[in-house]
Image (cartoon, rainbow, N blue to C red):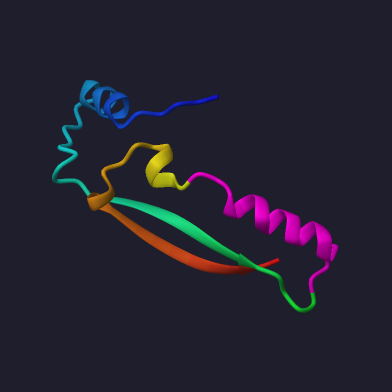
Amino acid sequence: MEDPRLETVLTLARGQGVDLDPEKTSFFIGRENLFLADASTMARWLANLFIFMSSNAADATSFFNLPPDRVVEIGVRLAI
């Protein structure tokens, strides 16, 4: 299982000549809000299971150990 750390990424970036200060950097992440469509081609029970499992996934801010006050989330509603 991967365990990405912001410090590791920034260290690798510095090695490539990119100097970023995490206290002055904004991080943009995407978020999907899934819902069941009326005319879904997927079996209803399977779609509900997928939505349930997706809602239990770790959020990107926690997974990548990003500073919460520096994160901008952009979301979209997806019908399945």
Residue ranking furthest to the top: 15
Residue 57 in view, yes or no: yes
**Residue 9, horizontal then vertical, whole percent:** 31, 28
Front in this rendered view, residue 1 or 29: 1
* Left or right of 30, for residue 10: left
* Left or right of 52, for residue 39: right
State the predominant SS element of the stretch in magenta: helix
Residue at position x 31%, y 41% in the image? 66
**Residue 59, horizontal then vertical, whole percent:** 46, 48
Q: Is residue 55 magenta?
A: yes
**Residue 5, horizontal then vertical, whole percent:** 35, 28
Q: Place residue 60 in its image quadrant.
A: top left
Q: Place residue 48 in its image quadrant.
A: bottom right
Residue at position x 80%, y 57% in the image? 46
Front in this rendered view, residue 40 or 45: 45
Picture mark count: 0
Q: Is residue 39 magenta?
A: no
Q: Place residue 12 in its image quadrant.
A: top left
Residue 42 in view, yes or no: no
- 12 lies above or below 63: above
- 38 lies above or below 45: below
Residue ranking furthest to the bottom: 38
Give the extent of the magenta segment. 40-58
**The C terminus is located in which quarter?**
bottom right
- 66 lies above or below 53: above
Residue at position x 79%, y 71% in the image? 40
* Left or right of 7, for residue 49: right
* Left or right of 49, for residue 1: left
Residue at position x 19%, y 39% in the image? 22
- 6 lies above or below 30: above
**The N terminus is located in which quarter?**
top right
